[in-house]
Structure formats: C-alpha cells, structure tokens
Amino acid sequence: MQRLLLVDDEPVSLRFLSKALAGVGETAEARDGAEAVTLFRQALDQSRPFAAVVMDIMMPGVDGIEAVRRIRALEAAAGAEPCRVLMLSCLDDAEHQMDSQYGAGADGYLTKPVDLATLRRALANLDLPANLLDAEE
Amino acid sequence: MNPLLSPDGPPVTHLGIGEGRIFEGPARVHVLLGSCVAVTFHLPGQGLGATFHALLPSRAEYARKEAHDTPFRFVDTAIETLLAALIRARVPLGSLEIKVFGGANSLVQGEFGIGQKNVRAAFSTLALHGLRVIASNVGGTRGRKLVFLPATGEVFMKTLSETPVRGMGPSGLS
C-alpha cells in the first residue's frame, strides 16, 4: 500500500485528512514542516518512501513551502523518484500558489475548506491511487 | 470509470489554442496544455461553466502586428472576455469556482519562462476583479491533458509523459 504523509498543525485537519485518505494509502502525520522533513528523511533511509505528501503552509517553525523545498532536496540527494506533493492551505493568493509550485516543486494546490470529493479528485489527478483518465483512454 | 467520462457521457468538445466559451448544457471539454493556460469557471448549482485555452500572457505585450488574433489567444484578454460574457449572462462573479491549469516550462520551446508568465497573468487578471482561485495545477516541465465538466466544475487531469513542444497544431500541445 502506498504511504502518504499528512502535514498540518491543526488536529482537526489532520483527523479529516487521515479519515478521508485512509482508502488511498497508509497515512503518517506531522504537525509542522520540520517534523515532516524528519519523517520524510527517515522514510527514505528505511527505503519506505512516501508516495505523496499533503502539506499545509502556515505552521509554526518551518512552513509548508520551505518543507517542500527541503523534501525535494532530500529526494535529489538520494536520487529518489519525486513523490507527489499537494498543498492544502487557506491561503488563496497568487504568490503562495506560484511559489509552492514554481519555486518549491509542489504538484498541485487546493484551498481550504475542501470537501472530500475535491481532495480525492486532486489526488487522482496526481495518479493516486489511479488516474481516472487512464480508464478513459 | 466515472460515468461522465464514459463513451455515453456528455458530448466532447476539443478546445484548441485561442478558443474559449461558456457552456450551458452538458459537455466534456478536452484541453491539451503545455506552456498554455486554461482557467476553468463554474457556477455551482446552475450547471454552467466556462473555460479557454490561451497561448500567451497579454495582448499588449505579445500581439502580432496586423494580426487579428482572437481574444482567447492571450490570458488577460481571454479572462476579460469570458468575465464580460458571464456578466452578460447575469452570473454573479463572486460565486464562481475558479481553477488554473497549465503553464509548464520547457527549454525545448526556446522561450523559457513563458508558462510561468502565463500563469502569473491569469492570477493577476483574476485578482483585478477580486476573484479567488480555489485550486491550481501549474508549472513543471510536462504537458497536461484536462477534461473539464462545465456542469459540475470537475476537472480531471493527467500529466503527460512528453515534454511540451510548440507548433503541434491547434488541438495539440501548446
């Protein structure tokens, strides 16, 4: 089963994500960017990499965009296949959406609040667990 | 398979470069994007949506001399044109669900950064109207295939394996 890393400093958000994505993969949780990077590094070291990360932005300490930058650097240093990174934030402005994707290397961006169907579709668009357009072709 | 994506689903419309429109009935809009941008608009509960397929950021900066380009060739005029049409259709702009896609960058194109400029133009033009973007999937170096369902606002997307190359024709990558 694919492993997903869910990162958010709000316990309510983590509970929602964990419940919503239980069918998509095995989930692990982090409450800030630094903890996320630590868990990501450990997963790489143990050869059990995460297939995807769902990342909040506004968190104490290391924010989500910086955490994605560090995760991409870890992958590059390890020669690992890039995981899918979906940002999930209440910030809806251009700077955060562009910096996350063009600057840090995230694969998509959703704004909160988000419903279950939208979240699952965004992950399916990143091929997690499967892309619905594959069935169309 | 999602029934809306099945062969018996809504009729398919392929949106080429420089095309855009409002959809008021059931439809399935296919768009292939490289550095181009598509912005999708959906009015929840009304079965109405709109989108376009633009090649370049702004008419003022990129219009060709003596060329009679469609407004949907440029991101800024594409958004202005669709918003004007939506206002004429009495759509409250503040109720729209708006998403931004595309803007891949590739050195192959010889115009590195045009994808990012396209996306920047989309966000800037929407911000001028006070409109928020609820989702985006932009950047990277690979093309995207979108299937937009205007009636529901859903966007199914797949990242393509090939690098976007310019000049593949109106229905090809851009």
Image (cartoon, rainbow, N blue to C red):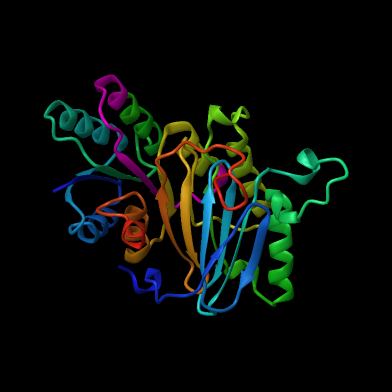
x and y percentages locating residue B158 in the rendered image:
40, 51
x and y percentages locating residue B71 in the rendered image:
75, 55
Residue drawn 39% across the image and 61% down it: A114
Residue drawn 65% across the image and 54% down it: B126
Q: Is residue A110 above or below residue B34?
A: below
x and y percentages locating residue B39 in the rendered image:
58, 56
Residue drawn 13% across the image and 48% down it: A1
Residue A32 falls left or right of residue B147: left
Pick the residue in front: A10 or A111. Answer: A111
Residue at the extreme right:
B66
Pick the residue in front: B41 or A87. Answer: B41
Q: Is residue A112 above or below residue A54?
A: below
Residue at the extreme top:
A77
Pick the residue in front: A97 or A89. Answer: A97
Residue A108 falls left or right of residue B105: left
Residue drawn 24% across the image and 53% down it: A129
Q: Residue A28, located in which quarter of the rendered image?
A: top left
One can see residue B26 in this view: yes
Residue B35 falls left or right of residue A8: right
Q: How many marks?
A: 0
x and y percentages locating residue B68 in the rendered image:
83, 51
Q: State the extent of the magenta-drawn residues as a range.
A: A74-94
One can see residue A89 in this view: no
Q: In which quadrant of the rendered image does the C terminus of chain B lie?
A: top right
Q: Is residue A74 above or below residue B99?
A: above
